[in-house]
Amino acid sequence: MEPIQLAIVGGGPTCTYVLERLAALTREQDAAVPLDIVIYDLSGEYGSGQVHSPRQTTTSYLNRIVGQVAFAADESVVDAGPLLAEGDRPTLLEWCRTKFEETGDPVFDMVAEDWPKRYVHGLALQDQFERYVAMLRAAEGITVTLRQAEVCDLEERGDRFAVLTTDQEPPFEADYVLMLTGHSSNKPETDPLQVAWARFAERSQARLIPSAYPLEQSLTPDRTGPGSSVGCLGMGLTGIDVVLYLTEGRGGVFERDADGTLGYRPSGAEPDSIVVFSRNGLFTFARPYNEKERDIAALEYKGAFLTTAAVAELRRTVGRRNLISGVEQLQLDFEKHLFPLIVLEMALIYYSTLYGPEFRELAIAAARPAYEKFLADAEAFPDHREACELLTGPIDALSLETAAAVDWVISGAAPLDGSAGAGLPVRAATTSFLTVVHGAEEAGRLLELAHRPHEFASAVATARSPWRHAASAARHRFSWAETISPIPRDSYRTPEEYREVFLDFLDTDIRWAAQGNLSNPAKAAADAAWRDLRGVVIEAVDFGGLLASSHRDFLDVYTGHHNRLCQGASCEAMEKITALIQAGHVDISAGPEARIECDENAGKFRISGPLTGATRLVDSLVDARVHRFDAERDVMPIYPNLLGRGIVRKWTNPGLDEPDFVPGGLDLTPEFHPVRADGSVEPRITFLGPPSEGVMYHQIGALRPNKDHHVIRDILKWINAFMPHGDTAGRHHQNEGKHA
């Protein structure tokens, strides 16, 4: 039997997951298939890829707690097939614990809720990659070849594709090609702003850094060293990476004072100033302590209103018919039809966290009539604001009644055993409220005084919340506008005032994040609605689920809200950012709507803040924004070349009485096969990751344990084309794996 020729382009994390599935499947006697596997990676960082390289700076954090990272399929993955023995499929947490026992290095001494450094994840990925390669090479009839080369094109040769590389070595001819190229960037010359900045840099002493990564190569001391000022465009995770690399990465040290405040001691190798700015003037919000980790299945949120059934009903009642890639789709408007359900769910979670499960049941019942009216005819509402007001109105009313009753009790004016609006027991609501504001232990101490109203009221009035919560229930109000724009525009007029209110917000946000995603109302609402229920949004968006203009707005506006609310950095990282602002090394005073101009007289970039009045000159400008994938504009030659050959085409969301929307990703089938220029499907090539963004949503992420994670199911779609495995065998071997 001739071996099947497999080419995998990209040797990063997803490649590690692929090799795990191949290793598990090929160890089964009845699934033995001869394979020739060639893995291409330009960086040579097999297993981790360049993004997670163990050789990168030690200042960058992984954007996920250590307990939420895996490298292999587990019992949760439906129809995964045979599982490896548990010792061969450690989670990142288990891998770190083993490493700590072996080395005693404190960097590996972690518990599930800790945030690992990105290079630690890279070490584990490379270790697991080597383990799975060894398993495959030990199997009869299987070869694995690692090629450090850039793949620039695929050329059809009969039934196979020749994999062409820039080193012009003889090409490998593959029966199946799996493209795992990961994150990339777009050609600077295709961005008019970057072209203008580059031309200015050429005729002045200013320096443009069009892409932040790899940090070690782009942010060199000659560009960003002492005596220089650096402008950082972007305040997301990449911007945070840039700031920490230019400070802690240059030898600076963070130290805690006696009162626990984090301070920064510079090394002298930092730039004189790092001016950080963005359209909204805010960093991503601190990611909350994950209280759900102790029992994910039970504690991850299940929606009451934002559900796949609701999406299906909205499609039936208000969906507009469109033909997309030959398939009929009922399209929705995200802002008009789905966003109001997200706001409703957030309001429910916020007040249920504040006042307890009894409140939740009453709130769901109160909101049900308006909710059903909305599902029946969402088009009856002129805009999303009115829809949000209608949907949240009953919950807002119930919360006001409850807040008034709670405040009467804690002021000593009413007994604890009364009832609030709609029959809600005041004791339950007050206990929940005091627990949120002060913590369970302090709440218990206060409630012991409830039978002495004046003493109780005095104790509550003098107690101070460690999370800076307001003492009065009436001051706890859910507001979408305040959630996404927590610094009021009228709270500052000068750079100094903006810095003051910015630091105040950071302090509160870090405290709220430390309280946790089950205990803090604001963090619970954001984490549950935008993270736990993300699958509902994916169901609504994928394969042209939104109208063309709505899809554009979703990616341009609401994806940013999603990232800021639930894709932020750890409390530890945000404490460091706070310390750097306080120490004067990071300047955030440009505020929202900051502008970049080319100052010809000074020969520098000028950053100005129209709302704060700040003006800052910088020697170097680094673009720390994440580029959206665009096959035509990608810096890697493979995608423009595949487009030119007609092997792939970009996906289009056709407009209904409006312009089409072409987000930049490839036109792919649900099996991740490309649709060729002539409309036919190419089953020999599979694309996972960023190229699928556009036709699908949120396809990038590390593998999670105990989650039936989509990345394994996506990988199996490729593997099943040449190595199918039956459901019965899969279940049999999964059961074996539980006891391995």
Image: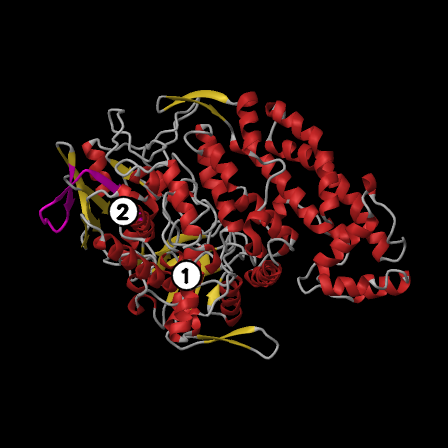
Looking at the rendering, in which quadrant would you find the N terminus? Answer: top left
Q: Is residue 272 visible?
A: no
Q: Nearer the viewer, residue 367 or 157?
A: 157
Q: For residue 186: magenta? A: yes
The magenta span reads 161-187
Left or right: residue 671 versus residue 329 is left
Left or right placement of residue 690 versus residue 476 in this view: left
Number of callouts in the render?
Answer: 2
> Horizontally, is 300 left or right of 28 in the view?
right
Front-most of residues 31 and 189: 31
| Residue 629 image offset from top left, x and y in percent | 34, 43
* Res 59 → quadrant: bottom left
Measured as percent of width and height from the top left, residue 701 is found at 41, 49
Q: Amino acid at mark 2?
A: Thr
Viewer-closest of 657 and 96: 96
Numbered mark located on residue 350 in the image: none
Task: Give the residue furthest to the bottom.
Answer: 258
Q: Is residue 25 visible?
A: yes
SS at badge 1: helix
The correct choice, above or below, for 229 with respect to 24 in the image is below
- Which of disc 2 and disc 1 is earlier in sequence? 2
Q: Secondary structure at mark 2?
A: helix
Label 1, label 2: how many angstroms apart (C-alpha)? 40 Å
Q: Can you identify the residue that label 2 sits on? A: 26
Disc 1 designates what residue? Answer: 241
Q: Which corner quadrant of the image does residue 215 belong to?
A: bottom left
- Asked whether 419 falls inside the magenta stretch, the response is no
Q: Vertical placement of 267 versus 509: above or below?
A: below
Give the residue drawn at x 40%, y 60%.
231
Placement of the C terminus among the 4 image quadrants: bottom left
